[in-house]
Image (cartoon, helix red, strand yellow):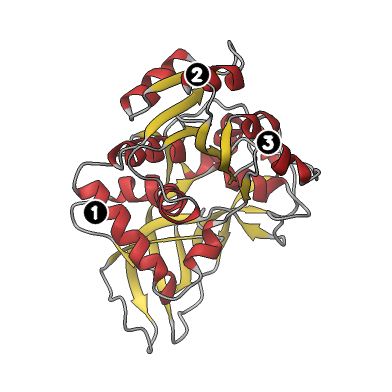
Amino acid sequence: MTKAVMIRKQGGPEVMELVELKLAAPQAHEVVLRHTAIGANLVDTYHRMNTTGQYAIETPAVLGFEAVGVVEDVGDAVENVSIGDRVAYCMVLGAYCERRIIAADQLVRIPDSVSDETAAACFIKGLTAQYLLSSTYKVGEGDTILIHAAAGGVGSIMSQWARHLGATVIGTVGSESKGRMAKANGCEHIIYYREVDFVEEVLRLTEGHGVDVVYDSVGVDTFEGSLKCIRPLGTLVNYGQASGPVPPFDISKLAANGSIFLAKPTLGTYIAQPGRQQRMSDSLFDMIERGIVSMEVSQTVRLENVQELHRDFEARRTSGSVVVIP
């Protein structure tokens, strides 16, 4: 048996319940994984709430999209991992549990120098930062970029990584404490979006030119303003919807704002190509081992307390990364 946080229908945090589930034996290409640390992400709340659209899931379901653990048993055909290996995975629903069955090809080995909590805190967020900075828009020396929610989990990693790549980073935050965090993580300029118009401030900081790329995980509240912050032929990357999804809009606005490129990428698309998740993971763990990227575990929560964690996510009371301990 294994304890797990399950939903039987979509709704508020109250629909989550702690249950005990029977664990089957692994099939040929599967392993039994004992979780040691589970990454908690805002996307978990989307899965909990949404009945339609990009984040809809079938119920009943165990929530959670990433975790770290130790392989306890393997199927007959498993070759890439062995019993006792420390591994991580992401983009596989069902992480809010003590143990699970999972396909072996979803797993990535963790270097000895990276702790379980660090890996759980940064795996989805770090892989997201990796593809956003290297593939969706290739950030390099001399670029000026805007990161919304710069003190959040992805924003914190992106700020450090982009600074290493030679970019000037502008970050929006909602409080002085988050501003200090964003500054420490590499943001050269901090914009307190509750106090000033972030569009006016970006244009002031860039002497009216705009930024090369905006990374926007906020969604509807910032989308229109983000378009106005970008230089001609620049890029707007919408990769989240903390304030709600962007409604349908007239694509001629992209032309009117300077022939803007618009991207709506997902991590799942990037790691679907065989071998790519491992290469992206190697890049992330290299950044961590070299001290270029660090991820503060701002909070640890027990599995039985995830309801309150989801309330904090929705109220934007969290910063950094939160790890659930089974």
Task: Identify the amino acid type marked 3.
Answer: Asn
Q: Residues within 10 Å of mark 2 (few under 14, many from 20)?
A: many
Distance between the alpha carbons at the discs numbered 3 and 2: 22 Å
Residue 98 visible here: yes
Distance between the alpha carbons at the discs numbered 2 and 1: 30 Å
Q: Are marks 3 and 1 in contact (CB under 8 Å)?
A: no
**Numbered marks: total:** 3
User: Measured along the vertical axis of the image, is residue 30 above or below residue 166?
Assistant: below
User: Measured along the vertical axis of the image, is residue 89 above or below residue 305?
Assistant: below
- Which residue position holds label 1? 286
- Which residue position holds label 2? 191
In this rendering, the label closer to the viewer, 3 or 1: 3
Task: Identify the amino acid type marked 1.
Answer: Asp
Q: Position of residue 239 (x, y in %)?
A: 58, 46
Residue 34 horizontal side relative to residue 64, left or right: left
Q: Position of residue 173 (x, y in %)?
A: 50, 22
Query: Could you say whether the residue bearing mark 3 is in a helix, strand or loop?
Result: loop
- Which residue position holds label 3? 257
First in sequence: mark 3 or mark 1?
3
Nearer to the camera, 60 or 314: 314
Determine the residue positioned at 32% across, 79% down. Answer: 80
Distance between the alpha carbons at the discs numbered 3 and 1: 38 Å
Residue 213 horizontal side relative to residue 74, left or right: right
Nearer to the camera, 48 or 169: 169
Q: Which mark is residue 253?
A: none
First in sequence: mark 2 or mark 1?
2
Determine the residue positioned at 45% across, 27% down. Answer: 170
Residue 301 horizontal side relative to residue 140, left or right: right
